[in-house]
Image (cartoon, coloured by chain):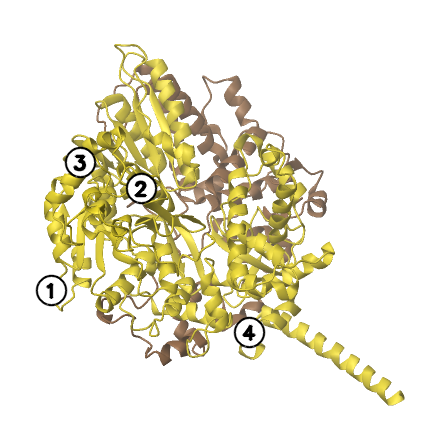
Chain colours: A brown, B yellow
């Protein structure tokens, strides 16, 4: 985490004049009630801990809804009373051979990544998706990669382009492009079930460059989920008065504050 | 359709019409259910069609040759014996054994339903299967589809009363028929096919049939399954305790399948799947590939990538890599395009060149119910989209989740249909053992049961708690269903069916929709609600081609009614009807002509049902007033699907469940109104509500006073807002009252 923060701001200077310091992960995820800082709760989409919640107490938050039986939460339900008239007792299951039947609703996680079976899934939660859509995320990153000027460095000077120099925010994307390029130039590829691995020297060289870029810093970065990455990206961009969703640079912070509808994507919807 | 299919009994077949028929009657001397396989085979091999009394066509004989090669055909003698001797049979036959097409025909040859004014029903979980199998079997029996052999699916009845004696139908349709004829008296034999899929309707039918078997000892029941876990069904249908129902088993025509696992879990299963397909294409012997993915978007995306990469491969190495055709398969694909999976693989580019290969990228449709010849390689990432219902937040959604071991085995089996095959599992063997459940959960454990409970009550099942479920659902799910039906006034407080509930059950619609349709004349807008219901019952009408997003969004904008998506649907349909003359209208407006035509058909069907129950079709002339009325009628059905705006952003809380949701990006509302009703709760990257219309809180309090009874309402912002509305209402009414009183005093 810390190495990630120290690396920023990036070495390549581009259009933005002033570069923001990167808030640490802890700060980012902390819920804030101050609306001037509303960008911080982007994508978290959990109810803010404000005065409302105290009033919801018995019905608040997603988690409680999922873990407490309706019979406890809603003992006066007409549905339950109808079932009782049919002979149901709380704690029992339905059917005439009750021993085998389920007593609790089946739980299924909402999978929104593409990690294979047995792969590590972070934050498994029922019905509480928190990650940004990966397509969306990629599009944003692409835009920023282009605006940053890194993409020109890459295109102008392909041979000496070092992906390790690319801003961590879009380094993954740069590496992806390089890798795709490498793939295209070389039809031999490593396959899941294939142990053969013939490489030519040019390939080895490029591979090494890629490996260099694949350092600890990137690993840390990759350990974040898309929403966290997107969050950092958004905050970074707003630091130089660019809003990803408006798609334009504002003159200054005031201009941004008064003319951009907000940090969240849905605040830009329908505009 | 003019006659009522529930009351018309089919007339006796021609054999009873006069003397001298015996010489022309191939079944002469046959006693129903005592016909031997030899006799049946002799009739099949003869020249006269016993059902039409016409000579068999050459096409019939040609198909018969093919039928004789089916595994089921080889066991005809045994089947006739088991069928004739037992009331209930459990049958296991792997996909491709011929059970779905042959067994119902065999049954007809022994049961002779056409001579007794009865029918044989064969249920299918999928509409498409019911239609396509009926077509195939009509061909095999040398009769026109819709005559002796027909099908019946929701909103489409392709049978002829009195003529049809073999009826393929969705399991849901048979359940609906049972509501008006609980003894299924029209049927002599009921075959439940694909029982292993454990659809909601099949599960309920199993419960009903088990009870019915005692009331009707003359009813024969066959439960057919494609997987080997038949013991559960045998036990369930054992007529005596501890004596399981007899099993009739047809070995599949399968070859061994070698299974490969990955060494490590895959970081991206789609990417891994694509790589695996290309690896097979480059390195493996000829044979087609079946790749299982989860949904339309993922499948189309993978197809694009596979095509691209395969082209690259071929252009780089034309001497060793052959052409590759990649075909998607999912249920929302138009039928014509679904047929493309049966196309042969592409030929080699040059006579001596490397052979071509076909890749089918499919949802789990191809897992059991559909057989594609030529598949030798299966790529299985281990996921499918599965429905899941959570009664605690009242959300039913389709979620991508790991498949079961049984499912994985079924998938692997698809590789061994033509010759020995290979299955590549994109997970480790350890995870196969550890992470996957044994069996897929039956749908009854994963569904909202509101509809089913209403059907069961209508069927006369009084005790839903002790009902003999094959697998009993979660108690909380039943509670939610009863609660909803009680709030909709379909069930009384004791669980008894109300008159309204009785009519609601007659409509093949969700209870909320049925309710709204039935009460809509009170709001002078049943004409419009009927349209909206039809539009909500068909697939998405909006087209949004990838390269024309802007244009299609602009077209949609033109149709949008800012007060609500329901009104927009109404507007689309009315415009569609006004432009019926223009064949390109739908396409020019980025709308699906197929879905709109379907909506037109559904609307006509529902209109007939409404007429049957004397529900008037009325409308309001003034458009503003009309829209207001429509929105109020919507509330009468969907008052339990209301969300209240929370704070300033696009964040809503669902009423009583307090789920944070946003308006779906497809939503056409131009503002973020305080109160909305929604048709659907969808979970993608975050929870959304889709098809949304703005409503007034006063309507909620007025038309759903039970549900919005504030004394029993959970505390929170929503309650406060409703209390404020109520207070304002009382104040105004007090004011008007006092004004009236003053007036009265003055007078």
Residue on which the image places disc 2: B133
* Rendered position, A224 above or below B563: above
Q: Residues within 10 Å of mark 3 (few under 14, many from 20)?
A: some
Q: In the rendered structure, which disc, 3 or 4, sits on the residue that comes first in sequence?
A: 3
Task: Measuring from the top left, give residue B473's x and y in whole percent.
Answer: 32, 65
Q: Write down the chain letter for disc 1.
A: B
Q: Which mark is residue B715?
A: 4
Residue on which the image places disc 1: B243
Q: CA distance from mark 1 to mark 4?
A: 55 Å
Task: Measuring from the top left, give residue B317's x and y in whole percent.
Answer: 31, 13
In the image, B598 versus A21, the foreground residue is B598
Q: Nearer the viewer, mark 2 or mark 4?
A: 2
Q: Nearer the viewer, mark 1 or mark 2?
A: 2
A147 with respect to B368 (left or right): right
User: CB under 8 Å between callouts 1 and 4?
Assistant: no
For this orientation, the residue located farthest to the bottom is B745
* Rendered position, A52 above or below B319: below
Task: Measuring from the top left, give residue A157's x and y in whole percent.
Answer: 50, 17
Q: CA distance from mark 2 to mark 3?
A: 24 Å
- Asked whether the residues under marks 2 and 4 belong to the same chain, the reply is yes
Q: CA distance from mark 2 to mark 4?
A: 55 Å
Task: Measuring from the top left, give residue B582's x and y in whole percent.
Answer: 63, 34
In the image, B228 versus B391, the foreground residue is B228
- Asked whether the residues under marks 1 and 4 belong to the same chain, the reply is yes
Q: Secondary structure at mark 2?
A: helix
* Rendered position, B445 above or below A230: below
Q: Which mark is residue B46?
A: 3
Q: Write down the chain letter for disc 2.
A: B
Q: In the rendered structure, which disc, 1 or 2, sits on the residue that comes first in sequence?
A: 2
Q: Residue at x 17, y 36 (%)?
A: B46
Q: Secondary structure at mark 3?
A: loop
Q: In the rendered structure, which disc, 2 or 4, sits on the residue that comes first in sequence?
A: 2
């Amino acid at each position: 985490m810390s190495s990630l923060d120290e690396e920023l701001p990036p070495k390549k200077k581009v259009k933005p004049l002033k570069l923001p310091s990167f808030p640490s992960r802890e700060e980012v995820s902390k819920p804030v009630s101050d609306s001037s800082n509303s960008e911080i709760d982007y994508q978290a989409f959990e109810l803010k801990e404000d005065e409302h919640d105290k009033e919801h107490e018995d019905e608040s938050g997603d988690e409680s809804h999922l873990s407490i039986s309706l019979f406890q939460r809603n003992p006066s339900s007409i549905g339950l009373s109808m079932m009782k008239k049919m002979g149901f007792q709380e704690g029992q299951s339905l059917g005439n051979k009750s021993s085998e039947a389920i007593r609790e609703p089946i739980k299924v996680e909402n999978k929104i990544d593409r990690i294979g079976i047995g792969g590590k899934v972070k934050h498994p939660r029922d019905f509480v998706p928190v990650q940004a859509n990966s397509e969306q995320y990629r599009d944003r990153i692409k835009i920023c990669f282009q605006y940053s000027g890194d993409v020109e460095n890459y295109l102008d000077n392909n041979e000496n382009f070092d992906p390790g120099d690319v801003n961590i925010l879009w380094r993954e994307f740069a590496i992806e492009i390089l890798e795709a390029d490498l793939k295209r130039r070389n039809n031999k590829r490593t396959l899941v079930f294939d142990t053969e691995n013939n490489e030519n020297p040019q390939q080895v060289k490029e591979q090494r460059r890629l490996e260099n870029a694949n350092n600890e810093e990137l690993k840390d970065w990759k350990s974040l989920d898309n929403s966290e990455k997107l969050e950092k990206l958004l905050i970074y961009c707003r630091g130089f008065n660019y809003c990803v969703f408006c798609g334009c640079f504002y003159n200054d912070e005031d201009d941004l504050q008064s003319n951009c509808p907000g940090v969240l994507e849905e605040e830009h919807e329908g505009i | 359709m003019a006659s009522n299919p529930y009351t018309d009994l089919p007339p006796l077949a021609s054999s009873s019409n006069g003397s001298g028929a015996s010489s022309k009657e191939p079944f002469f001397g046959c006693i129903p259910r005592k016909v031997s396989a030899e006799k049946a085979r002799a009739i099949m091999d003869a020249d006269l069609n016993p059902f039409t009394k016409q000579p068999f066509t050459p096409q019939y004989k040609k198909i018969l040759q093919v039928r004789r090669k089916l595994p089921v055909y080889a066991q005809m003698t045994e089947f006739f014996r088991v069928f004739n001797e037992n009331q209930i049979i459990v049958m296991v036959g792997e996909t491709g054994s011929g059970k779905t097409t042959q067994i119902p025909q065999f049954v007809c040859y022994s049961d002779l339903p056409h001579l007794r004014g009865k029918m044989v029903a064969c249920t299918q979980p999928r509409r498409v299967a019911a239609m396509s199998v009926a077509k195939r079997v009509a061909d095999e029996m040398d009769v026109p589809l819709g005559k002796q052999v027909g099908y019946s699916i929701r909103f489409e009845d392709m049978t002829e009363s009195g003529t049809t004696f073999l009826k393929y139908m969705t399991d849901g349709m048979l359940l609906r028929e049972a509501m008006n004829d609980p003894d299924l008296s029209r049927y002599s034999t009921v075959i439940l096919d694909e029982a292993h899929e454990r659809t909601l309707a099949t599960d309920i039918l199993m419960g009903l049939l088990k009870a019915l078997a005692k009331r009707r000892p003359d009813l024969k029941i066959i439960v057919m399954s494609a997987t080997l876990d038949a013991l559960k069904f045998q036990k369930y249908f054992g007529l005596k305790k501890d004596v399981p129902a007899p099993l009739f088993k047809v070995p599949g025509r399968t070859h061994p399948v070698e299974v490969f696992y990955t060494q490590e879990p895959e970081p991206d299963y789609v990417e891994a799947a694509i790589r695996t397909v290309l690896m097979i294409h480059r390195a493996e012997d000829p044979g087609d590939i079946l790749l299982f993915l989860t949904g339309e978007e993922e499948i189309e995306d993978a197809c694009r990538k596979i095509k691209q990469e395969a082209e690259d491969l071929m252009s780089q190495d034309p001497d060793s890599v052959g052409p590759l055709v990649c075909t998607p398969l999912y249920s929302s694909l138009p039928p014509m395009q679904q047929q493309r999976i049966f196309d042969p693989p592409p030929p080699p580019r040059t006579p001596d060149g490397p052979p071509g290969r076909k890749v089918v990228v499919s949802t789990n449709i191809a897992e059991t119910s559909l057989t594609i010849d030529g598949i030798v390689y299966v790529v299985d990432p281990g996921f499918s989209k599965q429905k899941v219902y959570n009664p605690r937040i009242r959300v039913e959604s389709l979620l991508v989740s790991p498949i079961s071991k049984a499912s994985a085995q079924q998938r692997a089996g698809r590789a061994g249909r033509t010759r020995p095959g290979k299955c590549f599992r994109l997970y480790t063997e350890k995870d196969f053992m550890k992470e996957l459940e044994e069996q897929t959960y039956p749908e009854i454990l994963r569904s909202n049961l509101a509809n089913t409970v209403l059907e069961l009550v209508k069927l006369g099942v009084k005790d839903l708690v002790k009902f003999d479920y094959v697998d009993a659902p979660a108690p909380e799910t039943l509670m939610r269903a009863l609660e909803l039906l009680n709030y909709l006034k379909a069930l009384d407080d004791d669980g008894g069916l109300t008159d309204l509930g009785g009519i609601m059950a007659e409509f093949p619609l969700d209870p909320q929709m049925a309710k709204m349709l039935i009460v809509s004349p009170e709001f002078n807008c049943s004409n419009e609600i009927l349209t909206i219901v039809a539009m909500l019952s068909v697939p998405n009408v909006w087209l949004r081609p990838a390269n024309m997003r802007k244009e299609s969004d602009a077209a949609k904008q033109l149709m949008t009614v800012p007060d609500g998506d329901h009104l927009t649907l109404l507007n689309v349909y009315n415009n569609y009807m006004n432009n019926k003359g223009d064949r390109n209208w739908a396409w020019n407006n980025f709308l699906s002509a197929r879905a709109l035509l379907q909506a037109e058909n559904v609307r006509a069907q529902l209109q007939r049902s409404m007429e049957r129950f004397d529900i008037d079709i009325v409308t309001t002339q003034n458009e503003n007033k009309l829209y207001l009325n429509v929105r109020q009628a919507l509330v009468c059905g969907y008052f339990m699907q209301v969300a209240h705006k929370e704070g300033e952003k696009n964040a809503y809380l669902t009423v009583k469940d307090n789920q944070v949701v946003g308006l779906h990006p497809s939503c056409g509302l131009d503002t973020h109104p305080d109160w909305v009703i929604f048709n659907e709760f969808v979970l993608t990257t975050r929870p959304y509500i889709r098809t949304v219309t703005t409503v007034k809180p006063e309507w909620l309090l007025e038309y759903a006073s039970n549900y919005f009874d504030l004394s029993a309402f959970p505390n929170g912002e929503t309650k406060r807002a409703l209390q404020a509305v109520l207070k304002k209402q009382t104040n105004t009414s007090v004011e008007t009252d006092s004004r009236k009183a003053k007036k009265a005093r003055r007078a």
